[in-house]
Image: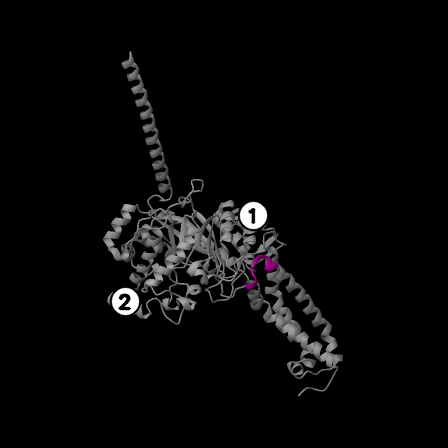
Amino acid sequence: MALHRSQKLNLLRLAVLLTVVLAGIKFFFRDSFTLDQRKDSGSDGGFWAQAGDLQQSAKARGPASEFKAPMPAAGRQTRKQTLQDFSATQMRLVHLDLKGAAPRVSYLEQIFPLFSKLGANGVLIEYEDMFPYSGELESLRSPYAYSEEDVDKILELAELNKLEVIPLVQTFGHVEFILKHDKYRHLREVERFPNSFNPHVPETLALVKSVLRQVLSRHPRSHWVHIGADEVFHLGEGVDSKTWMSRHGGDLGKMYLGHIREVVGFIASQPGGFQVLLWDDMLRKISPVALQDSGIAKHASPMLWFYSPDFDTQQIGKYVAKYAECGFKTIWFASAFKGTTGPAQAWTPLDHHLQNHLRWLKVIQSMPATPSIRFQGIVLTGWQRYDHYSALCELLPVGIPSLAICLQTLVNGGFTEATKKKVLAMLGFQSLQLEKGTCEGSGAFPGSEIYRMVEQVNSQLRDSVIKVLEEESSIRGWFSPYHRKHQFGNPRNLESFGAKVLKVHEDWESFIQSLRSQLEGVYFPDTVEEWMEENVNPYMDRLREFVRDFREVIRLNARPKAP
């Protein structure tokens, strides 16, 4: 009887042990399944190579250009299951070019809901010197750079409005904001020009990695990162590059791809599963064989950009076919809703940008003819400067009507009367004139006051000043530049036109003060001052100087001509 009880007790213990073991096995496989799901959700159907593929490819190329397999960072969450997976979604991104006229976060809070309403599902943020770099990179920050809290707020606002955020970090060309500093001058490809990195100096890649590391760490929920890599001006002209080319048959494309491979490989090694985007212009003349051998097609997608209203769609088709041949699985396009019609353009030509998007629609509609490469999305670029040193292009509020027209054209497959009515309703306008580039009505979108007031500056200020100062015969006769220089005149004659000039001056000063107040609500002080200097002061200063001289001569009360 005692033996029987002992057997029962042993059996009970065995049952408990088996239960614990089974629970442990279930817990282990649950975690493995979750991890596999997360990995697959970021792979975009094989777009990203598995770790084994990366290692095998690296061995084939040798240690000098090794791609490192992605390694998870301890304690860091790389992706959350609650986030939307954009890998199979056709993206429509609004480009925010922050190298000039970067908006305050409070304005982004107002405008992001409109982006989403108009049909965007993402934003491409080109931070340049507006990112809160820290440590050794702190010198790259603009005095008005966003804080870390600002960036977190921007990402929060984007997620709230269902906008994917893709950071853009220039890694080869257009790095003036870095190479202008004495600290990094020795990294220039050509010492005289701050445009492009010298890819042969080891410190170049180390710096690029540091910049990328800081930006990526603040965007753990992003699916893509854009590495720029366009317009690498003067590449091959530096002493180091000439030496390299003399040893490699003058192959500029291979030299370019060598740097890009390193950048892409570094991003592939980072936690988070970022997919890489890059502008395609430097790839266009590189042979398909060289692009295939580089291995970047496993980790990156080219972004074709054409901004003219009448670009050759057949040529685009040839580029698409070439990139498909090179092994790229997805492809992106880039149009423009502002900032491409002149480096100092103040007003956005609506029809120009509409025609550009109608062309891109034709290209998008033809993509099924190349099934081996998938159209992933289009970026509506809104350039704010042509480069770090150029003047400002159109302000963002000025470009909003163009953005609305272009986004809705893409969403609806054309710009019909029905589409036009939707745009007018969403922006609060009564009508629009495409050829004239104007919209009638008060407008009811964030920044519409700036839109209206800039329109008046653009269309009336210059003509108003010229008319009152140059076309008034009484001014030419009794208050010419000679009169003003020698400070003499008859008050009787001056009073015949004085009231009119003073009224014009007073009205414009009042208007400009209101405009300044509106601009200060959207932009930082440096932007307000720059825009005023470029667009207002050239005309207002003439008027102000005239009024100053007028009042001084009236005060002198017809004294003799000064020597």
Q: Earlier in the sequence, mark 2 or mark 1?
A: 2
- Residue at the top extreme, as displayed: 1
Q: Residue at x 35, y 62 (%)?
A: 204
| Displayed quadrant of residue 451 | bottom right
Q: Nearer the viewer, residue 333 or 16?
A: 16
> Looking at this rendering, what residue extends furthest in the bottom direction?
563
Relative to 548, 532 lies left or right: left
Q: Position of residue 179 (x, y in %)?
A: 41, 66
In the displayed structure image, the side of residue 203 where residue 429 appears, left or right: right
Position in image of residue 287 (x %, y %): 29, 59
- The stretch drawn in magenta includes residue 522: yes
Secondary structure state at the residue bearing disc 1: helix
Q: Which residue has dot 2 on it? A: 245
Q: Confirm whether the magenta stretch covers residue 284.
A: no
User: Which residue lies under the disc numbered 1?
Assistant: 422
Picture coordinates of residue 141 (x, y %)? 47, 61
Q: Residue at x 35, y 46 (%)?
A: 72
SS of the residue at dot 2?
A: helix
Q: Quadrant of the C terminus?
A: bottom right
What range of the chain is rendered magenta? Answer: 518-526
What amino acid type is highlighted by mark number 2?
A: Met
Q: Residue furthest front?
A: 2
Q: Is residue 186 above or below residue 171?
A: below
